[in-house]
Image: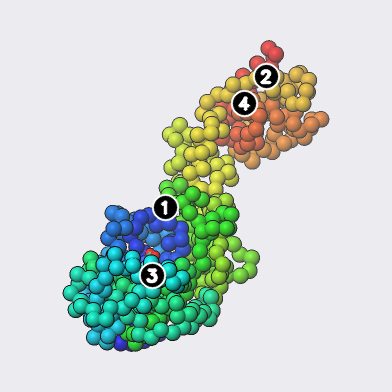
Amino acid sequence: MEPNQNKKVVTRFAPSPTGFMHVGGVRTALYAWAYARKNNGTFILRIEDTDKAREVEGSIEHIMKSLKWLGVEWDEGPDIGGPNTPYKQSERLDSYKKYAQILIDKGFAYADPFTEEEVEIFRKKAEADKKPFLYREYRPENPPVWDGSMPLRFKVPQIKSYEWDDLVRGHLKAGEEALDDFILIKSDGYPTYNFAHIIDDLEMGVTHIMRGDEFISSVPKFLSLYDALEIKRPEFVMLPPIMGPDGKKKLGKRDGAKDILDYEKEGYLPEAMINFLAYIGWNPGGEKEVISKKEFIELFDIDKIHISGGKFNEEKLDWINKEHIKLLNEKIVKENILKWLPEFLKNEKLVPLIRERISKWSDVKIMVDSGELDFFYKKPEIDPSLLLFKNTNKKIIENNLNEVIKVFNELEKFEFENIKEILNKISESKENRGQVLHPVRYALSGLSKSPDPFIISFILGKEETLERLKSATLKLENL
Ligand code: GLU
């Protein structure tokens, strides 16, 4: 019963379909996938659906959709099959039965005849003796023949302490108390995780098991089962947890641990998401913080995975996403920004201005909703007294505005660079540049804080700019 001995790396992501994919699950998938890709190995998607009570409808589709959004493609899986099909545990019951029988034949499994009440008595006794409750201390003397109506329990062949190597944590040990007669097959006919994953990993030839480090305390149990079945242990790679922003406890829903597809809806880039999640718990070393998917695969290695948990920080995600937007070509940026703009603001000229100010596409909507872009399609309300830059005499401002109107009128090419050049030239000839730039900016936007007058004039266009400047000048006359 040797596992697949060829040297090819085989990893798997084995989620339970118990709800949406959260960032922790995604990161596990990313590491297993990257490791397989880097080593020209195989990456398997396996659905661990043996806890029917916890199953949530639609989760399997959701898991696949999430991985597809990220571009994490699997080589074998429930939808595409593969040499070890099926890839859903609920469809692999025959395999578990086969190995259960092998264990029964070897004397390493027994039907558990005890009722809940009897187990409660054992538990109380252990409590009274101030000892941990272990099933193996209450083994039935003459267990009935297992007919599937009772749970099938593993009979730990040898009570001993175990040692093993974990590729992240190094050499680990655990005492005898970590071993117990755990359930292999429940009375509903489904196997437990402890049993099923070992059989699947064996049959699927998995070489490296990557999973969250909450499974560390169960490893001795797994090892005793590998021994009982005389199968070679795969490599263990226990991944550090993702911690909440305070770094003190595991990331929970209250810290904003959300559905990975919510990030898609908010307009994050999948590559940025990969970059961000990959760096929680792993770092290739060096200064580089922004990496592509391809670089992630090239740089990924198990020995750079951290032992302690990394913090989940959405501000960091926003920063990384902004950096990834900078790497996109103009056409894609334009398409996305325009897509997020309402009809009345769909103006290509707004793209460079918006691009500077967003971290993710949904920020475009936030900008629109805040009203800060309203003046681009609606004439602003002007309070003429606010045109006066630092108490500059009204006449000076009026003259300056008229000068700009005149020069703009004559400007043939009303392009950003030309506008900037001419406005700078006029403003530099004055006592203070603000005496020109401020009234122009305010006359055009009606806001005390807004983008610079060059970009606003360019976006509004010659006609609208002149109209707004003239109307402000008129108001100033009447002040
Ligand atoms: N089905 C387990 C879970 O979702 C996966 C553990 C493993 O990768 O072995 O937690």
Judge left or right: residue 327 versus residue 108. Answer: right
- Specify which label sits upstream in the sequence, 2 or 4: 2
Q: Which residue in the structure is indicated by mark 2?
A: 384
Q: Which residue in the structure is indicated by mark 4?
A: 446
Indicate the amino acid at tag 3: Lys
- Mark 3 packing: few (<14 Cα in 10 Å), some, or many (20+)? some
Residue 371 picture location, percent across and down: 54, 31
Asked which secondary structure carries label 4, the reply is loop
- Specify which label sits upstream in the sequence, 1 or 4: 1
> Disc 1 to disc 2, how far (Cα)?
50 Å
In this orientation, which residue lies closer to the viewer: 412 or 469? 469
> Disc 4 to disc 3, how far (Cα)?
79 Å
Indicate the amino acid at tag 2: Pro
Disc 2 to disc 4: CB gap under 8 Å: no
Judge left or right: residue 247 versus residue 195. Answer: right
Q: Nearer the viewer, mark 1 or mark 4?
A: 1
